[in-house]
Image (cartoon, rainbow, N blue to C red):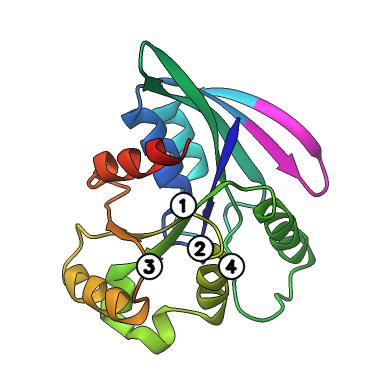
Amino acid sequence: MKRVIVLGQPNVGKTLFVLNFAAYLGVELAVLNFTSCDRGSYSKTLPVSEAVRLLVSDTSHYTRDIQALTLAMSWGKGEKQFELIDTVGLTDGIDHDEEIRKAMALTLRTIRQADIIFHLLDCARIAEIGILRGIGEIDYQIAQFGQLKKGYVILANKIDLPNAEDGLVMINQEFPGCRIISISALKQKGFKEVKRFAKQLL
C-alpha cells in the first residue's frame, strides 16, 4: 500500500486537508491511526465532522502526533487503497518545546517512508507577508527532497481567501518546474485535480 504524506509549516491546513479529502473520497467514519513519541500507537474512530472539530485548530503545533487514514480510490472494477498521513508542522530552527522537537523528528523519520509528498503552502499568508517570511527554509528543503521523488506536488492552500491568487503567483515564481495545484482545504476546491494526480501514482 502506497503512503502519501502531507507536509508543511504549522497552520497551513494539513489536518483539515487530510480530513476533508477523506470526506471528498466518500469517507464518513474516519479510522485514525495515531503515532505519538510518548504514547506509542493508538487508534480512534470518529465521524469526519467530529474529527475536524476535535483535531483542527488555529493554534500553532496543535497537531503533535502522526495521524494516518487508510483511504481508497476506485480503480477499474475495484479500488486501490493508500495511506494518507497528516504530520506535525515543520519549522526552521530548533523549537524550545521538547515535545514539539520530538514530534518534528518523528515527522522527518516518516518522510523517508513516503511514496508521494503533498507539500502544503499557505498562499493567502504568502500574499500578505511576502515570500521571504511566508516560505521558510524548511519549505525549500522539502521541495528539494520532494523533487527527487516522482510523486511530489505543492498544494497552494487557502485559495478561497482574499488576495490568495497573488500568493499563488509568487509560489509559481519561487518554485519553477514544480507541479503546483491550488486548493481550498476548507471548501474542497481543487480536490478533483489532487485526486487525479494521486491516482496516476498509486
Q: Main secondary structure of the magenta part?
A: strand
The earlier-in-sequence mark between 2 and 3 is 2
Label 3 and label 1: CA atoms lie apart by 19 Å
Which residue is depicted at the point 48% across and 23% down?
A: 80
Three-letter code for the amino acid on which mark 3 is drawn: Cys
The residue that label 4 is drawn on is 145
* Tag of residue 8: 2
- Is residue 103 found left or right of 191 in the rendered image? right
Q: Please, what secondary structure does the residue beneath circle 3 have?
A: loop
* Tag of residue 79: none
Which residue is depicted at the point 26% across and 44% down?
A: 193
Are the two marked residues, 1 and 2, in contact with CB atoms closer than 8 angstroms?
A: yes
> Few, some or many C-alpha atoms within 10 Å of disc 3 (few <14, some 14-19, many ≥20)?
some
Three-letter code for the amino acid on which mark 1 is drawn: Lys
Q: Looking at the picture, how far across and down is residue 164, in whole percent?
A: 21, 69
Pick the front one: 38 or 114:
114
Label 1 and label 2: CA atoms lie apart by 7 Å
Pick the front one: 139 or 81:
81
The residue stretch that appears in magenta: 33-43
Check residue 188 for magenta coloring. no
Which residue is depicted at the point 48% across and 35% down?
A: 202
> Few, some or many C-alpha atoms within 10 Å of disc 2 (few <14, some 14-19, many ≥20)?
many
Q: Looking at the picture, how far across and down is residue 201, in whole percent?
A: 45, 41
Q: Looking at the picture, how far across and down is residue 19, in whole percent?
A: 43, 37
Three-letter code for the amino acid on which mark 2 is drawn: Gly
